[in-house]
Image: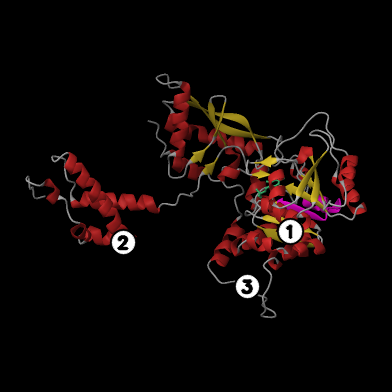
Amino acid sequence: MNSNTSNPLSNIPGIDSLLSTDAGNQLIKKFGHKAMVDTLRDQISSLRKEIQQDPTALIPDDETLLAQAETDLGQRNASSLKPVINLTGTVIHTNLGRSLLPRSAIEQMQLIGASASNLEFDLQTGKRGDRDTHTEQLLAELTGAEAATVVNNNAAAVLLVLNTLAKNKEVPVSRGELVEIGGSFRIPDIMSGSGCKLVEVGTTNRTHLKDYAQAINSETAMLMKVHTSNYEIQGYTKSVDEFELANLAREHKLPFVTDLGSGTLVDFEQLGLPPEPTVQQAITSGADLVTFSGDKLLGGPQAGIIVGSHALISQLKANPLKRALRVDKVTIAMLFEVLKLYRNPDTLVAALPTLRHLTRSVNEIERLAHKLVPEFAAQLGEFAEVSAVPCESQIGSGSLPTARLASWGVSITPSDTTRRHEQTLQLIIQGFRNIPIPVIGRVQDGTLIFDLRTLDNPEHLITQLSHVSIP
Ligand SMILES: *Cc1c(COP(=O)(O)O)cnc(C)c1O
């Protein structure tokens, strides 16, 4: 580099000269001319400031400046949304994206995402079609309902039902069912947002049929039962079951709606899991509409599914809000593939990640824990004690709130005596987050636990371990 001691600023290379080098040309091909000019301009302007403050500061050579531009642009282009390895022990983890999709759904998503499709086009008549036709028949077949429609999520499903059937009217709901789910979904808020008036009946722990009966008047639009999915009241409790409520609604010629929240289509007890009401049971008990999530226990994409009578589903479809809440083609493609798996109970569990994880044998998880302990220990030996421990997984997403599934994990307990226990623990947790594919565990009694129930690919995890470094 020429040195011009009288004015060090003149030694800073120009953007054009940097871009005209071979390396500069390569980067233009990779990131585009405009992005390169913008980045180099930022770099050079901060370099000028640096030199103005300290005229003896070193001016980097062209190669270094271009390498820095490449790093900056690479980071700016990296997706903020990226895969992580969920070893929290919560199988359906809302903050980590809930259900993992089966292979068949991913293939279909690629196919439909990349191509035009008959999303709303009737191939028989050549006329405009209805996007619900692609899933409605299968939903009816699997749930025993007459008709179905699909919206963006279950919160949207509840909103659409209330807005369609109960706007400016009253809906009695048991006090014990006025739930908040994950802070963003509160039944009372959804009710006011949908324009209907909530009438609280009963008490937090006990609600009787007569409480509902007394609340019914000429302003009542419907009866509703909400599955209290993320908490459980134990002790002196009473709630009114669906069958009784359905009969009461029928006597008063009112629709009866059940918000199941998770809503499974299979008998959980047969799978060795804690019991969970099925959509079929809700329909058999007399619900006129049932709402449930696509990405909770069903194991599919984010969606809100509404099944029920022809007449009521038609009313929902005619509400302009349905247009605002509709799902896209990729969701429909995935949902169909997930639902299809339920047609064959013999292969369902193996094919659907959510059910496979929930039913995984504890012996298999234990073997995996013992196998992985040396891999973790090799990486953390000087900071922590690593061992295989029994632990308990949760289902998550408000499903079966008190149920725990026996599991095994790798526990990491700080043993570094030069720092405080909590400080080392936080450094270790961060070490596992600051790697290309972050590994997320949970802390329990001062120990970091990686529950292996949801680990599908141990080799993949081992590769990530080699990136972990604790300062
Ligand atoms: C989870 C849940 C919802 C919201 O479902 P999303 O699909 O997350 O929008 C509504 N009601 C109940 C009872 C739930 O458990």
Q: Is residue 299 left or right of residue 198?
A: left
- Residue segment shown in magenta: 279-292
Secondary structure found at label 3 = loop
Q: Is residue 290 magenta?
A: yes
Say above or below: 84 vs 315.
above
Viewport quadrant of the C terminus: top left
The percent position of residue 124, horizontal first and vertical second, equals 69, 79
Quickly name the residue at label 2. Answer: 34
Comparing labels 3 and 2, the label whose residue is closer to the camera: 2
Residue type at tag 2: Lys
Quickly name the residue at label 3. Answer: 118
Labels 1 and 2: the sequence-earlier one: 2
Say above or below: 244 vs 204.
below
Q: At 29% across and 54% down in the image, what residue appears?
A: 39
The percent position of residue 71, horizontal first and vertical second, equals 32, 50
Comparing labels 1 and 2, the label whose residue is closer to the camera: 2
For residue 312, say whether it is visible. yes
Give me the C-alpha separation between circle 3 and circle 1: 24 Å
Quickly name the residue at label 1. Answer: 343
Q: At 40% across and 31% down in the image, what residue appears?
A: 470
Residue 308's image quarter?
A: bottom right
Secondary structure found at label 2 = helix
Give me the C-alpha separation between circle 1 and circle 2: 53 Å
Residue type at tag 1: Arg
